[in-house]
Image: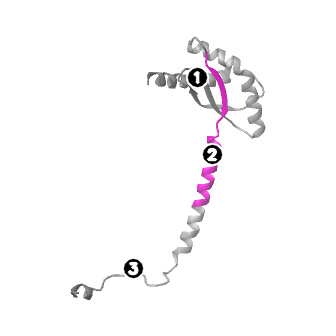
């Protein structure tokens, strides 16, 4: 349990360190407008997964991925120094798909709201095909009868 808490704490620190390094130290022109969204660290502190998003299209994503890959050694070295660990964790960078997924969900919700509005508009002046109350009810006379 203590190992998990320490790994989470170090992962949060790694997220901040990587973001600062990308902003200040990595001078690769291929690096786009990148945001570090999360970092996960294995319990043995050996491997760190860093998640990021990139503003722009597919070209920006590809060039940023290449820039991150080429700067991985520098970033790992700096992260290791800052954390003071005997062995710096290896780093792997992953494009975070959450923003794109959230955009797709928002679009689907918008379409659902439009469809609901059309149904509500069509139902506004509608009348039931049969009786207004389609449920059968016992007659009051039926309750007095004894079988």
Image spot of residue 6 (x, y percent):
48, 21
**Mark 2 falls on what kind of element?**
helix
Q: Judging from the image, what secondary structure is the residue with disc 3 in? A: loop
Snapshot quadrant of residue 56 = top right
**Mark sitting on residue 63:** none
Sequence order check, earlier mark of 1 and 2: 1
Q: Is residue 29 magenta?
A: no
Question: In which image quadrant can residue 55 be found?
Answer: top right
Q: Between residue 51 and residue 36, name the one nearer to us.
A: 51
Label 1, secondary structure: give it. Answer: helix
Work out how far the residue at label 3 is from the one at label 1, CA to CA, in angstroms. 64 Å
Q: Which residue is mark 3?
A: 135
Left or right of 137: which side holds 87?
right
Q: Quadrant of the C terminus?
A: bottom left
Q: Write the residue at 48% across / 81% down.
A: 128
Which mark is drawn over residue 14?
A: 1
Pointer 2 residue: 101
Query: Is 131 left or right of 87, judged from the image as shown?
Result: left
Q: Is residue 60 above or below residue 29?
A: below
Residue 90 inside the magenta-drawn segment: yes
Query: Mark 3 near mark 2, Cβ–Cβ under 8 Å?
Result: no
Q: Nearer the viewer, residue 84 or 27?
A: 84
Circle 1: is it few (<14), some (14-19), or many (20+) Cα within 10 Å? many
Residue drawn at (56%, 71%) of the image: 121
Q: Position of residue 125 (x, y in %)?
A: 52, 78
Q: Position of residue 51 (x, y in %)?
A: 63, 32
Point 61% across, 55% down: residue: 108
In this picture, which residue range is highlighted in magenta?
88-112
| Badge 2: residue crowd in 10 Å (few <14, some 14–19, many ≥20) | few
């Amino acid at each position: 349990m203590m190992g998990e808490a320490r790994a989470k704490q170090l992962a949060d620190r790694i997220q901040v360190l990587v973001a600062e390094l990308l902003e200040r130290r990595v001078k690769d022109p291929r690096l786009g407008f990148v945001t570090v969204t999360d970092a996960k660290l294995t319990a043995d502190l050996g491997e760190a997964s860093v998640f990021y998003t990139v503003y722009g299209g597919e070209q920006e994503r590809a060039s940023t991925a290449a820039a991150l890959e080429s700067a991985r050694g520098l970033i790992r070295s700096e992260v290791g120094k800052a954390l003071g660990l005997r062995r710096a964790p290896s780093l792997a960078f992953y494009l975070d798909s959450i923003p794109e997924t959230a955009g797709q969900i928002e679009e689907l919700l918008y379409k659902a709201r439009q469809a609901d509005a059309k149904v509500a508009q069509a139902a506004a002046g509608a009348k039931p095909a049969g009786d207004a109350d389609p449920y059968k009810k016992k007659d009051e006379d039926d309750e007095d009868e004894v079988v």
